[in-house]
Image (spheres, rainbow, N blue to C red):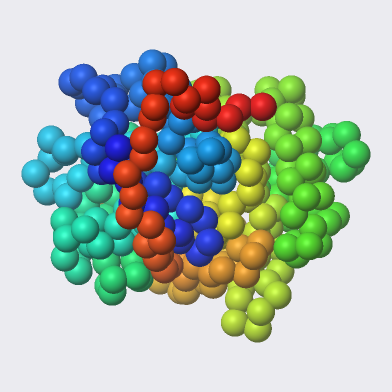
């Protein structure tokens, strides 16, 4: 299996260029559903140890039926599909440039939740224009064991997020273990309380938001991903959800830049516009770097061929 590894703001992406499963025909959403239902071993084997680790996100590249798109991408983590992934879109463009499949400039990438546009402005710098994002619910209150009462918003940025500023743990890298435990407990409480996104969609990302640590920043976050790993980058879909909330609260005007820090200090530059329907269209700018160009092997007798799952 031919793969290109990259990181975006510290968060890894593994782009599968060839050797992935046959997902048949139909829409990209149909193929993504087939990947989730029939090929869970593939996702785990590609991303988990010994070949990867639980923070890694995969991008399975497929031909697009839309001639205006450079490629189709199904994003996934070790536990299943992602609707959209900002950092992986940046990593995908940088990887495709690395192997000579695209040039600098604007490109369209088809995802299961819609087509996104991305501008590769240098070999390592990308601006992603994400899918329309919105706040689904404001000021949801719930009691969380060990954390007390927490209030936050539910928002869509390509994935479902619960965003809250009410974290009693400082948003510093030295507190990642404690932040992870708190976010897991909060997410379990959301599930137990039946708090969901639209149409009963499970909220699988938790985002703690707070003040920046650098003088140039406007905000800082800690994001818990579906598999329980934390996002090393500021999280593109999480930033999109945040932009939707800022826009709804009148705290950020269209076109005004916002510097978002991750828990490790990497940054994205954010802004948004409104489309003809008034929806928030996020723009996320960041840097990605290729770190490996490799062939993965899957020996039939390897006892950990499908990954180490404990």
User: Which residue sits at x=56%, y=43%?
Assistant: 53
Q: Position of residue 153 (x, y in %)?
A: 65, 45
User: Which residue sits at x=26%, y=22%?
Assistant: 23
Q: Is residue 262 left or right of residue 280?
A: right
Q: Is residue 35 left or right of residue 226?
A: left
Q: In the picture shown, does residue 22 fall above or below 209?
A: above
Q: Position of residue 82 (x, y in %)?
A: 45, 36
Q: Is residue 159 left or right of residue 125?
A: right
Q: Position of residue 213 (x, y in %)?
A: 70, 75
Asked whether residue 7 is in view, the answer is: yes
* Quadrant, the N terminus: top left
Q: Is residue 173 left or right of residue 102?
A: right
Using the image as rendered, state which of residue 12 and residue 52 is in the foreground.
52
Using the image as rendered, state which of residue 135 and residue 22 is in the foreground.
22
* Quarter of the rendering containing residue 292: bottom left
User: Which residue sits at x=39%, y=21%?
Assistant: 300
Q: Looking at this view, name the residue that lies furthest to the top.
A: 38
Q: Position of residue 32 (x, y in %)?
A: 34, 27
User: Which residue sits at x=41%, y=61%?
Assistant: 291
């Amino acid at each position: 299996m031919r793969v290109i590894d990259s990181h975006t703001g510290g968060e890894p992406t593994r782009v599968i260029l060839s050797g992935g499963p046959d997902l048949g025909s139909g829409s990209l959403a149909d193929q993504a559903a087939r990947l989730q239902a029939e090929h869970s071993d593939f996702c785990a084997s590609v991303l988990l140890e010994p070949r990867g680790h639980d923070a890694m996100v995969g991008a399975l590249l497929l031909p697009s039926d839309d001639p205006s798109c450079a490629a189709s991408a199904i994003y996934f983590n070790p536990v299943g599909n992602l609707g959209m992934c900002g950092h992986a879109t940046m990593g995908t463009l940088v990887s495709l440039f690395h192997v000579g499949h695209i040039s600098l400039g604007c490109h369209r990438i088809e995802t299961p939740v819609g087509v996104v546009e991305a501008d590769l402005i240098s070999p390592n710098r990308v601006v992603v224009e994400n899918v329309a994002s919105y706040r689904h619910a404001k000021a949801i209150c719930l009691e969380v064991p060990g954390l007390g009462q927490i209030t936050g918003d539910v928002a869509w940025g390509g994935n479902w997020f619960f965003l809250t500023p009410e974290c009693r743990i400082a948003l510093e890298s030295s507190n990642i273990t404690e932040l992870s435990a708190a976010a897991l407990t909060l997410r379990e409480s959301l599930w137990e309380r039946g708090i969901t996104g639209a149409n009963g969609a499970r909220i699988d990302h938790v985002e703690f938001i707070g003040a920046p640590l650098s003088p140039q920043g406007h905000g800082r976050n800690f994001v818990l991903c579906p598999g329980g790993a934390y996002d090393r980058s500021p999280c593109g879909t999480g930033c999109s959800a945040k932009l939707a909330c800022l826009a709804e609260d009148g705290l950020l005007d269209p076109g005004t830049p916002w510097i978002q820090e991750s828990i490790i200090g990497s940054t994205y530059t954010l802004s948004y516009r409104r489309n003809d329907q008034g929806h928030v269209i996020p723009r996320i700018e960041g840097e990605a770097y290729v770190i490996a160009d490799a062939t993965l092997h899957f020996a039939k007798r390897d006892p950990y061929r499908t990954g180490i799952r404990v």
